[in-house]
Amino acid sequence: MNWIEILSISQLDDIISKSHTNPQLILKHSTRCSISHMAKGRLDRAEQPANTEFYYLDLIAHRDISNAIAEKFSVHHESPQILLIKNGECTYEETHGGIRMEEIEEQLAQ
C-alpha cells in the first residue's frame, strides 16, 4: 500500500481537486486504538486498486485535520474511518470492522 500522509489541512483541497480525475481514499487512523490498527493492517495486506490514491491521517497527531475532514465532507467523526472522495464529495464512508478492501472496490466500481 502506498500511503500518502496527510500533514496539513491544505492537502484536503488537493484531494478534492484530484478526486475529479481519480477517486481518493482517506483513512483516519488512531495510533492508540487496536481496532484502528486491525483495519489499517487489513488494507495494508490488500492490493491497492489502480487509479486511486490512499491517504493516511494520524488523527492523534492531527486532530485539527480530522475535524476539518468531518466538516468539509459532512461526515460524523469516527475512528478508524475511511472516506471515498469522488468529484469533490464523500460518496462512501465506513468505520471499524466494516473497513474492507472488497467493499472499497465495490464502491470504486459504481
Image (tube, rainbow, N blue to C red):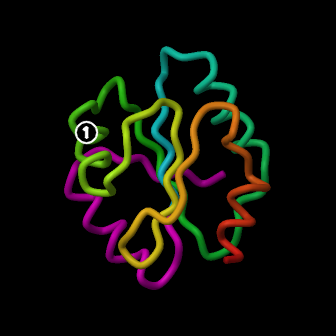
- Residue 100 percent location from the top left of the image: 73, 46
Q: Quadrant of residue 107?
A: bottom right
- Residue 105 percent location from the top left of the image: 73, 64
Which residue type carries mark 1? Asn
Q: Residue furthest bottom?
A: 21
Callout 1: SS: helix
41 relative position to 20: left or right: right
81 relative position to 57: left or right: right
Residue displayed at 40% across by 76% down: 18
Total marks drawn? 1
Residue displayed at 37% across by 36% down: 77
* Magenta range: 1-24
42 relative position to 11: left or right: right
75 relative position to 40: left or right: left
Residue located beneath label 1 in the image = 67
Frontmost residue, 49 versus 72: 72
Residue displayed at 69% across by 32% down: 97
Tell me the crowding category of disc 1: few under 14, some 14 to 19, or many 20 or more residues within 10 angstroms, Cα based. some
Residue displayed at 53% across by 32% down: 80
- Residue 39 percent location from the top left of the image: 66, 33
- Residue 34 percent location from the top left of the image: 62, 16
Q: Is residue 95 above or below residue 3?
A: above
Q: Is residue 10 magenta?
A: yes
Q: Quadrant of residue 59?
A: top left
